[in-house]
Image (cartoon, rainbow, N blue to C red):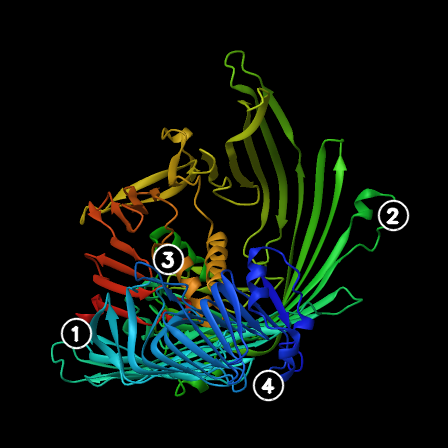
Amino acid sequence: MERRVVAPDTVLNPQTIDLSPLDSLDKLVQDTIPSADSTKTVPKSDIQTVINYYGEDSIITDFVNNKLILHKDAWFEYGNIRLDADLIIVDWEKNEIFASGVVDSLGNIQGNPIFKEGGTSYEIRKEMRYNFKSQKAIIKDVVTEQQDGLLRGQTIKKDTDGSIYLDRGYYTTCNLAEPHWHISANKIKSIRGKQVVTGPFNLHFNGIPTPAGLPFGIIPDTPDEKASGIVFPSWGQERARGFFLRNFGYYFAFNDYIHTRVTADVYSLGGYGAKAATVYKKRYKYNGGFNIDYQAFQSPETELNPIDYNTIWVNWNHSPESRGNSRFSASVNAGTSNYNNVVINPVSFAANTRAEFSSNISYSKTFQGTPFSMSANMRHSQNIQTDEVNIILPDIAVNMNRQNPFQNSRIEPIKTLNIAWNFNLQNSINNRITPPFGVQSAALIQQEELELGLNQNPNVIPFNRENLAQLLREADNGARHTIPISSNFRLLKHFTGTAAANYTELWYLERINYYFNPVENRVDRILENGFNRVGFFNSSFSLNTNIYGFYTPKRGKKIERIRHHMQPTFSFNYTPDFSNPAFGFYQEVQVDQEGNTQLFSRHQGFIFSGAPLGESRALAINIRNVLEAKIKQDSDDDKIETKKIPLLQSLNFSTSYNFAADSFQLAPINFNTRTSFFDDKLSVNFSGNFDMYAEQRITNPQTGATTGRRINQLALSSGQGLGSLRNLTLNVNGNINPTGGDRSPGELREDLTNDFLQQGGVMNEFVENEITRIVNDPSMYIDWSIPWNLGFGYNIAYNRQPGRDANVTSALTFNGDVSLTEKWKVKFNGGYDFMTAQITQTMIGISRNLHCWRLDMSWIPFGRFTSYNIDIRVNAAMLQDLKVSRRRSFFDF
């Protein structure tokens, strides 16, 4: 039964208590309550609010000692506190509450107290005393929840501000009565809303102490992770750099908008590193992060493999959240070329195999009430294999949206006529050096690379301060105007026509003059300064239509109808020959002593290149096909339903014929198709091109080497059949599991984010980077709800150039995981190269769900990234860095 008591004057006045009989317990209460006259002598207390209390077995008021005794499933509420226990004694004289469990007939303690104050809960194993006036408490053997973890102590003193002091306590994230692990310390202090501080502690597993520990510990207790504190290091050993302490430093939570983590690395063989990571956020405006990592190492002790390097890497990302007329964003990845070769993540080696990195800082603005918009960018690209660096600063663009000046006209081609304008200004600084001597025609260079498959490294100089003057002096810059004009209209009811013309004008501040050097028998060049413009145009006209065909099988009950959709497009393109001397865009230059000449573009290698070479009057044909079937399905209500399935999602053919070319007028026939089966569990992509010209093979009588080339004659007329298949590619990819399909990267990212937030985590830059790393490497993520998952892919490529033998590559890749039990899962990925008869990069891993921990073991048995990794990690959002790990990677050799 519940009683309401109003304090202080009428706290025990029976006239304020409803004593009407409700059941047998009410009679017991009435018998133990004195008469009204005896309550007039009760003094005032320090109780300042309404008290609610209840006792299942009995409620006894002792007026002699001024106490209230509650028995069996009792509870007591006062302000923001609530106490549940089988025995509660309220001492009005001392302003104290005593609570404990009771011993049953078998000697077991039942009904231990549970004390709640605000959002903090204390599970008490023995007894407690609480003072109303001072709000202090003494508790024996208690467990309390602190953020993601649990605190337990033999004796706890609770202070007025909510801070608690534990004697012989421990901290754990395991919620079992006998936890799998805990941090044990003689003294622990928990400061409400800030942190948990311990004295010297060590880790215990299943009650067994381990040597792992530190002189003191600080665990955040702030729901929004707003506390500054020490970042404790990880430790280990590498064969090359020795013993190490990594990521030791301090976390600065300056305010709600910016946090910074500064850490350092120390290696016993002479290396060190320094890192700074900052995240910032302005609500409803922007958010981002800035990271910098500097690593230095010098070890003369490793005589067989001496190491000496200084390397740095910078990462910055900035994203706006507003929907205004302007937008500023940034994505920067830049550093020294050797960073990804010496600073290696043994868990994920994806970054170490990337050859190119790029960055972009952009600002854009739309001018309201006008068709104009502008953008300004700073672009950066870097190839760590060729050491080529290119920085475009600035990159300014001004665009005018398409306008319809004659939209009120009744004539359709004029009514739909639209015009736009695009302007682009760029300045490019790169360390690729173009030699002024021995210049070769760009057309010949492109032809050689196409026929011989050459991909030679560019001639570059170091991108550093010493070469800055030369880099700025040889910077490429220019401006480009583009004016597209087009009109759409319908012809003969079933055709759609499009007429278009494009005018392009380039502005440069110099051009190239070529001359033949008879002494060296080569072509050299000199730059001529001065404003120089290049204007050229092209036009096109196209027609397309849609053709539908239907086929109804006479036999078979499943397939109801097959539909074929064909969309042919015919287009004619015209481009004048801008190599005509009247334009002045090309220069005919003698190239050898025999007097042979070649055409050279006077803007070869410029940022926007120059005018196109040669006249083009080409008819292009493209045929797109889609094949679908409608099948019958039986439903639960015995109704026949139909379902549309793709037979061929696309089957495309394209080619062109250039009437203005003096040779090889017919372009190769390109074809590609794609489709999927079994509800998109299996996808197939097939593409290639077919050359209809004949080829001629020439054998060198001295060396015996055979070379070949295309000849301007159709293969059919030369007795070589219809032609030659030059390229052919087949890709088959599939993923199967009992859930009916694999999740997309976006779905996986959303699931991981939601799981993290449900565990009480707070999103920040570090968490987002970790989620991105898992999404990019799905083998790191384990979905325990799926018993098995298998992904596979098969790729085969055929390539044959004129006069050469065919080159065929074929490989199989696979990945997946299998749950042996609810707690054990095996994961794997690998592949097989059929041409080299070798197994490709392979990883085998085992994961064990240990309730509050997770054990991960992975092994890469061979290859460049040979390594093994054993990781035991706490399953708590804020203790993800508390782990016991042993790694041996390819970097240790």
Q: Which residue is mark 2?
A: 409
SS at circle 3: loop
Left/right placement of residue 255 relative to residue 113 reads right
The dot on residue 669 is none
- Choose the circle earlier in sequence order: 2 or 1: 1
Q: Amino acid at mark 1?
A: Arg
Q: Give the answer, above or below, for where 759 lies relative to 570.
A: below
Determine whether label 2 and label 4 are within 8 Å by CB. no
**Sequence order check, earlier mark of 4 and 3:** 4
Location of mark 1 (residue): 239
Picture coordinates of residue 781, whole percent (x, y): 37, 56
Horizontal relation, residue 505 to residue 272: left or right:
right
- Tag 1 or tag 3, which sits nearer the N-term? 1
Which residue was labeled with disc 4?
46
Q: Earlier in the sequence, mark 4 or mark 1?
A: 4
Question: 300 or 465, which lies in front?
Answer: 300
* Residue at disc 2, secondary structure: loop
User: Which circle, 2 or 3, is nearer the viewer?
Assistant: 3
107 sits to left or right of 228: left
- From the viewer's side, name the closer residue of 72 and 26: 26
Give the CA distance from mark 2 to mark 1: 79 Å
Measured Cα–Cα span from mark 2 to mark 3:
57 Å
Please indicate, yes or no, whether residue 324 appears anywhere in the rendered image.
yes
Q: Is residue 251 visible?
A: no
Tell me which amino acid carries mark 2. Answer: Ser
Q: Percent x, y for residue 152?
A: 35, 73
Image quarter hosting the N terminus: bottom right
